Image (cartoon, rainbow, N blue to C red):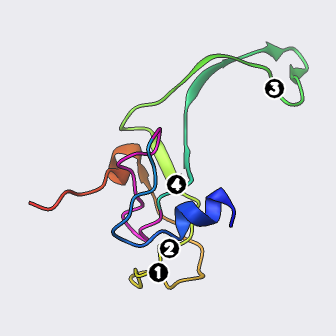
Amino acid sequence: MSDRKKQTNAKASENPNTNCLEGRRCPKCGSYGPFTVLTRQWASIHDDGTDDPPKMYGDVEYDEDAPARCQGWPAEGRDEPVQIGEECDFEGKWGDFLEKKDA
């Protein structure tokens, strides 16, 4: 099974992420990623555009207010509001993807 399938098909109670996505989960479908986040990064821009692919320099930067999208599939055991097998279209802020801890 691919890493992406392992990540997005994890049971609702098991967060498989231990690095950049640790503690992150889509609030709509329950996916543990991957996610798309609008970042800030230096790029080389020329009069005729950028290199193809663009050369990027420095660290990728983003914060909790950065626009983010789910690009995963719903976690198994989570049937609302997205059904298993349907791609999720949630868009929000990166901070919206923090898992809610039970009180």
- In magenta, the rendered stretch is 19-31
Give the CA separation, mark 3 to mark 4.
22 Å
Q: Position of residue 86 (x, y in %)?
A: 59, 80
Give the residue pinned by disc 4: 69
Rate crowding at label 4 as few (under 14), some (14 to 19) or many (20 or more) other CA atoms within 10 Å. Answer: many
Q: Earlier in the sequence, mark 3 or mark 2?
A: 3
User: In the image, what residue type sits under mark 4?
Assistant: Arg
Rate crowding at label 2 as few (under 14), some (14 to 19) or many (20 or more) other CA atoms within 10 Å. Answer: many
Element under disc 1: loop
Q: Which residue is rendered at x = 23% and y = 57% of the image?
A: 100
Task: Name the quadrant containing residue 81.
Answer: bottom left
Give the residue pinned by disc 3: 54
Give the CA separation, mark 4 to mark 2.
14 Å
Q: In the rendered structure, does residue 32 fall within the stretch colored magenta? A: no
Give the CA separation, mark 1 to mark 2.
7 Å
Please identify the dominant SS of the magenta region.
loop
Label number found at residue 74: 2
For the N terminus, the quadrant is bottom right
Element under disc 2: loop
User: In the image, what residue type sits under mark 2?
Assistant: Pro
Element under disc 3: loop
Give the residue pinned by disc 1: 82
Q: Is residue 100 left or right of residue 56?
A: left
Q: Is residue 47 left or right of residue 10?
A: right
Rate crowding at label 1 as few (under 14), some (14 to 19) or many (20 or more) other CA atoms within 10 Å. Answer: some
Give the CA separation, mark 3 to mark 1.
35 Å
Q: Position of residue 35 (x, y in %)?
A: 54, 51
